[in-house]
Image (cartoon, rainbow, N blue to C red):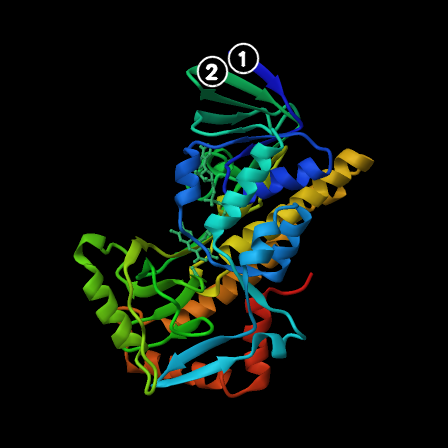
């Protein structure tokens, strides 16, 4: 078994792990990033598309926004559509100028990987049998296999950035309290080679189910429809998907443009939080600690907030020997986690047709939608959560 030492061992090369590695590097703190999938696999995963300004600012601090500044699309509002009407929520007007940036998580990950490899920093893909040890006794280390050999990585701290299905949260299961809600529906998402048919995102409430019109670039659309969580994508030929999208987004005087479907998939939906997000020298960040339904566009942005808090805490610890921010890491993250959990649940409940829901449910949803689109205080509440609450 080969031995190696670093300051911070980062498990997972998703946006959380990669951004943490970059922030630590720029602060002169060594880290090793371990990823069990291949680079191609990680870079091909299509996930989030909406970046809060805080996320863009953090990526700027990480030094990886050269392409984002060129290709990112700034949006100042979204639409809510229901009862045959499309209403604009002027996000920037309601939040003193804050906006969102449309830039795929896939692109964020590609930029972070390129930056790390260009700097010659350790990022190991296709590792296996990762296990974390010693984090309760102050001498943490990670064991794993790579290139056919067994490895041991000694460190001061382990950052569990390995997502919902990773290995870091399970090892502290006994000290965790978890909170979760499974939703009786999921999203079927497509990436289509066609210009978006609307200038900003459109969240559609419809009797047949929710639909979302989003985008990835001026020539590439990202669209979703609510579906059963166990939907078999093989049952959804492109024609059926477009038919459902037309039905759920129809609006007088407007039409949805179709195009070649480049990618399609079904993702389930859950709300989940594990408390606390730290134990000894193990710190959980991102989806390893919490999951939100994507309706509020919070998952990626929440992961980035965790990583900012953790990076600042580690820098304080290494530079000044003070552990205060590390000790309060979990509490400092969970305030924002629960705000995002509530907002994501609220957006999801307002816009999706729950199987078995009745007319009373629908009337409540329509009342909420009408209130949010006609009351400035109500619209402001949605807007400030959507663009990301200021620290
Ligand atoms: P990730 O899951 O992104 O990264 C964890 C990394 O750890 C992965 O690369 C994984 O391969 C690796 N890993 C796992 N186990 C490991 C092990 N044992 N050893 C080493 N590495 C290991 N959010 C939005 O805001 N909007 C959306 O539309 C949206 N859509 C989504 C669709 C899907 C299908 C999914 C699953 C999530 C979606 N999300 C969305 C949420 C998503 O963007 C996450 O919030 C974001 O990826 C969180 O980043 P990380 O915490 O880095 O976790
Ligand atoms: C996306 O573009 O993938 C997207 C946008 C907004 C959401 C969820 C997903 O709420």
Mark 1: few/some/many CA within 10 Å (<14, 14-19, 20+): few
Q: Describe residue 371's horizontal placement relative to residue 238 as left or right.
A: right
Residue 248 visible in the snapshot: yes
Q: Quadrant of ligand 2?
A: bottom left
Under circle 2, the secondary element is: strand
> How many badges with numbers are in the image?
2
Classify 363 as above or below 173: below
Q: Which residue is mark 2?
A: 150
The residue lying toward the viewer, choosing from 3 and 180, is 3
Residue 259, quarter of the rendered image: bottom left
Q: How far from the left and from the top, in percent, is residue 8?
A: 64, 31
Classify 386 as above or below 11: below
Q: Which mark is residue 139?
A: none
> CB of mark 1 within 8 Å of CB of mark 2?
yes
Q: How far from the left and from the top, in percent, is residue 198?
A: 41, 74
**The C terminus - image quarter:** bottom right
Q: CA distance from mark 1 to mark 2?
A: 7 Å
Classify 355 as above or below 104: below
Q: How far from the left and from the top, in percent, is residue 304?
A: 58, 50
> Mark 2 or mark 1, which is nearer the start of the sequence?
1
Q: Which residue is mark 1?
A: 2
Mark 2: few/some/many CA within 10 Å (<14, 14-19, 20+): some
């Amino acid at each position: 078994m080969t031995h190696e030492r670093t300051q911070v061992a980062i498990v997972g090369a998703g946006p959380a792990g990669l951004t943490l590695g970059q922030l630590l590097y720029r602060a002169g703190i060594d880290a090793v990033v371990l990823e069990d999938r291949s680079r191609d696999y990680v870079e091909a995963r299509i996930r989030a598309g909406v970046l809060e300004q805080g996320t863009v600012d953090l990526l700027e601090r990480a030094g990886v926004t050269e392409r984002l500044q060129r290709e990112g699309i700034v949006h100042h509002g979204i639409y809510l559509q229901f009862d045959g009407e499309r209403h604009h929520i002027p996000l920037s007007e309601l939040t003193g100028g804050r906006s969102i940036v449309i830039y795929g998580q896939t692109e964020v990950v590609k930029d972070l990987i390129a930056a790390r490899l260009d700097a010659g920093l350790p990022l190991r893909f296709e590792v296996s049998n990762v296990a974390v040890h010693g984090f309760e006794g102050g001498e943490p280390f990670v064991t794993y296999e790579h290139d056919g050999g067994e490895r041991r990585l000694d460190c001061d701290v382990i950052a569990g950035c390995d997502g919902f299905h990773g290995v870091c949260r399970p090892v502290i299961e006994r000290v965790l309290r978890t909170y979760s809600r499974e939703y009786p529906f999921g999203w079927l998402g497509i990436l289509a080679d066609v210009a978006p048919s609307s200038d900003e995102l459109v969240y559609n409430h419809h009797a047949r189910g929710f639909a979302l019109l989003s985008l990835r670039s001026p020539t590439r659309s990202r669209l979703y429809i609510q579906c059963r969580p166990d939907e078999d994508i093989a049952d959804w030929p492109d024609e059926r998907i477009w038919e459902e999208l037309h039905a759920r987004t129809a609006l007088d005087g407007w039409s949805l443009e179709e195009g070649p479907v480049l990618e399609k998939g079904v993702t389930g939906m859950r709300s989940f939080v594990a408390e606390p997000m730290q134990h000894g020298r193990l710190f959980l960040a991102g989806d390893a600690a919490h999951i939100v339904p994507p309706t509020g566009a919070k998952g990626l942005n929440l992961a980035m907030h965790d990583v900012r808090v953790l990076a600042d805490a580690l820098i304080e610890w290494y530079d000044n020997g003070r552990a205060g921010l590390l000790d309060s890491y979990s509490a400092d993250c969970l305030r924002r986690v629960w705000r995002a959990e509530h907002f994501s649940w609220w957006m999801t409940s307002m816009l999706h047709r729950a199987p078995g829901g009745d007319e009373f449910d629908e009337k409540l949803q329509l009342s909420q939608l009408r209130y949010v689109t006609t009351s400035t205080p109500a619209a402001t509440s949605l807007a400030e959560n959507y663009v990301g609450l200021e620290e």
